[in-house]
Amino acid sequence: MFSAAEIDAMEAALDAALLGPRGANPLVGAVVVGPDGRQLVTGYHRGAGTAHAEADAIAQAGMKGVDLAGSTMVVTLEPCNHCGRTGPCAQAIIDAGIASVVYAVDDPHDPAAGGAATLRAAGVSVRSGLSARAAFELNRRWFEAVLSQRPFVTLHIAQTLDSRIAAADGTSQWISSPESLADNHALRSRVDAILVGTQTLLVDNPRLTARDPSGKTADSQPLRAVMGLRGIPDDAAIHGEDGRVLHLPTRDPHAALEQLFSAGVRHVMVEGGSSILSAFLAAGLVDELIVYLAPTLLGSGTAALNDLGITTLADAQAWDWDQASGGAVQTLGRDLRLHLFPGHTGPAAEAASPAASGVSAEPVVPDLFPSPTSPLQSLPHRTGAGTATGGN
Ligand SMILES: NC(=O)c1ccc[n+]([C@@H]2O[C@H](COP(=O)([O-])OP(=O)(O)OC[C@H]3O[C@@H](n4cnc5c(N)ncnc54)[C@H](OP(=O)(O)O)[C@@H]3O)[C@@H](O)[C@H]2O)c1
């Protein structure tokens, strides 16, 4: 069973998790509770390559001089047991003298699984299942991507008020405000790959690098991927200096993701154009949607999306506002940045169901939940410069 302090701490951990960025890694929050029930420190995961939530909380305790001996760590995901870029959290918890761990859901990712067993073997009390449903909802699409063994997919649309991504003459640089462009380039620097269609490659001749507003390239650069049957011209700007370009000679989004996953990509941002955006949306393969909405009208030109296979309103794709990672709506210069994730209903949810993705005929949720050491809590769900050569 769980104490009132542990239930409150899990609520706080779920809130903290929302501060992290969505992507290759899950959103995770951790709160350490003292023997008297007081919340001592709160940590969260700031994205791939940074400290996990548990390690973040322990580091904060170190900085503040808080002794965690005999305390309880309450965390939204099973502590990891693997030595990746950040070291195993289970060992860090043991080393910190934490006596007890309460977590919400099992980590479904094989190399990371097993933290609970390591903790128990070291004499740490471990209980699981507290707010399991809410914790699953927090990362519902990340679980789906992990189980499908495909990259997490962020879809990016930079559009006018009337949903145009290019004018009738093909010009599209720049529909977005400088602030939106800067935000997009920051995203580029933290994804593993950017994907565009062959038509965008041929029309825009983009570089697809991550750059700061002065044009300086960021230290971390994504793989640049192009999807479509036509080849990449030898003199295309996308080759850049490092030549880290991958051609995906397919029109099937599933096959494209398979190839990207084999290349080590765990988070891809699909940037366009409309045929590619539509293909991923129609297949239910989009985990996160970011729309930069510019307060301009074109009236004609390339529509952001074309056929999604929907002919009646009842089949409309349902999307939910995503409060994570900076919120559902932000103002970026003159633009609005809209942040959404697929809803539970409609074709997107169905296409993404385990049966449709070929993962398993069983529902994902029960498979992911820990073998309960206590009944699942029924807390509320959370919704949780011109078109110049080498321009974009
Ligand atoms: N505002 C923005 O954020 C933004 C971003 C990107 C692009 N754009 C604009 O978008 C426009 C290009 O859009 P677009 O729709 O014409 O081209 P696109 O989506 O970039 O590429 C379409 C091409 O990709 C290939 N392809 C691969 N998979 C496909 C699939 N499932 N369905 C259809 N085609 C597939 C086909 O070429 P193959 O024959 O080679 O297979 C197809 O002709 C440009 O004007 C560009 O400036 C705007």
Image: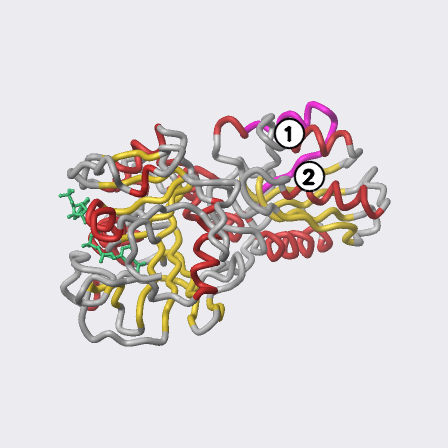
Q: Position of residue 80 (x, y in %)?
A: 59, 32
Residue range in magenta is: 113-129
Disc 1 marks which residue?
87
Query: Quick check: 209 left or right of 49?
Result: left
Query: Quick check: 222 left or right of 286?
Result: right
Which of 93/365 is in front? 93
Which of 59/369 is in front? 59
Q: Residue at x 16, y 39 (%)?
A: 230
Q: Position of residue 25 (x, y in %)?
A: 50, 41
Q: How many marks?
A: 2
Mark 2, secondary structure of its residue: helix
Q: Residue at x 59, y 30 (%)?
A: 85
The stretch drawn in magenta includes residue 345:
no
**Callout 1: few (<14), some (14-19), or many (20+) C-alpha neighbours within 10 Å?**
some
Query: Quick check: 98 left or right of 121?
Result: right
Q: Amino acid at mark 2?
A: Ala
Q: Amino acid at mark 1?
A: Gly
The Cα atoms of the two marked residues, 2 and 1, are separated by 9 Å
Beta carbon at label 1 within 8 Å of ligand 1 = no
Q: Visible in this render: residue 192? A: yes
Disc 2 marks which residue?
55
Q: Position of residue 104 (x, y in %)?
A: 58, 44
**Callout 2: few (<14), some (14-19), or many (20+) C-alpha neighbours within 10 Å?**
many
Mark 1 and mark 2 in contact (Cβ < 8 Å)?
Answer: yes
* N-term-proximal mark, 2 vs 1: 2
Q: Visible in this render: residue 1? A: no
